[in-house]
Image (cartoon, rainbow, N blue to C red):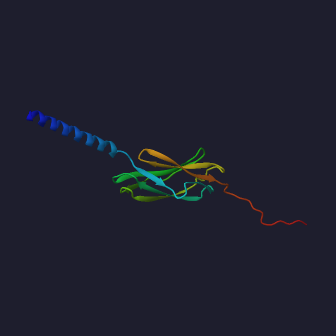
Amino acid sequence: MKKNIFIVGIVSSFLILSLILSNASLTQGKEHFEIECIQQSGVVDKAPGEEFTVKITFRNTGKTVGSWNINIAFEGENWSWAGVAQHLTLKPHHRGTLTWKGEVPENAPARSIARLIVYFNGKFVRLDWWIRVTEAAELSIVSSTVK
């Protein structure tokens, strides 16, 4: 009888330990982070060749330290631009801000648009930020005369 209770106790302990370890391995691979923007969307007018700056604040919403390789791109039908990937490590519930500087391609057609996309560890998030290409040259009347 004591032998049976001992065997049942060992099997039960093994099953509980297996359940705990399998749950830990399932949650370990999940990525918990969010992107925060002060203004959630917008359209920014830029001329071909004009510089822009993108700042994005991230927060680790998970329970452990997390590391991500993050990059951004502006993607549209007529032009695109890609940044340089950056690495971000955050403790649980901490925030970090990354900054990218870029330039609208010289060959970007006027009146075209491209949307900001954030890429991280094989995933992507489309943000509602757009660059609209304006005419590079603008004509204005400086003076006129009639005689």
Image-based side of 82 in relation to 141, left or right: left
Q: Residue 89: x percent and y percent?
A: 37, 56
What residue lies at 29% left-to-right and 44% top-to-bottom? 24
Q: Residue 41: x percent and y percent?
A: 57, 53
Is 124 located above or below residue 97 in the figure? above
What residue lies at 23% left-to-right and 40% top-to-bottom? 16
Name the residue at the front extreme: 1
The quadrant holding residue 60 is bottom left
Along the line of sight, which residue is nearer the eye, 27 or 117?
27
Can residue 144 be seen at all in this image of the molecule?
A: yes
User: How many dots with numbers?
Assistant: 0
Name the residue at the left extreme: 2
Along the line of sight, which residue is nearer the eye, 40 or 85?
40
Quadrant placement of the N terminus: top left
What residue lies at 40% left-to-right and 55% top-to-bottom? 88
Quadrant placement of the C terminus: bottom right
Image-based side of 4 in relation to 54, left or right: left
Can residue 84 be seen at all in this image of the molecule?
A: no
Along the line of sight, which residue is nearer the eye, 56 or 10?
10
Along the line of sight, which residue is nearer the eye, 52 or 126?
126
What residue lies at 45% left-to-right and 59% top-to-bottom? 97
Q: Residue 87: x percent and y percent?
A: 40, 54
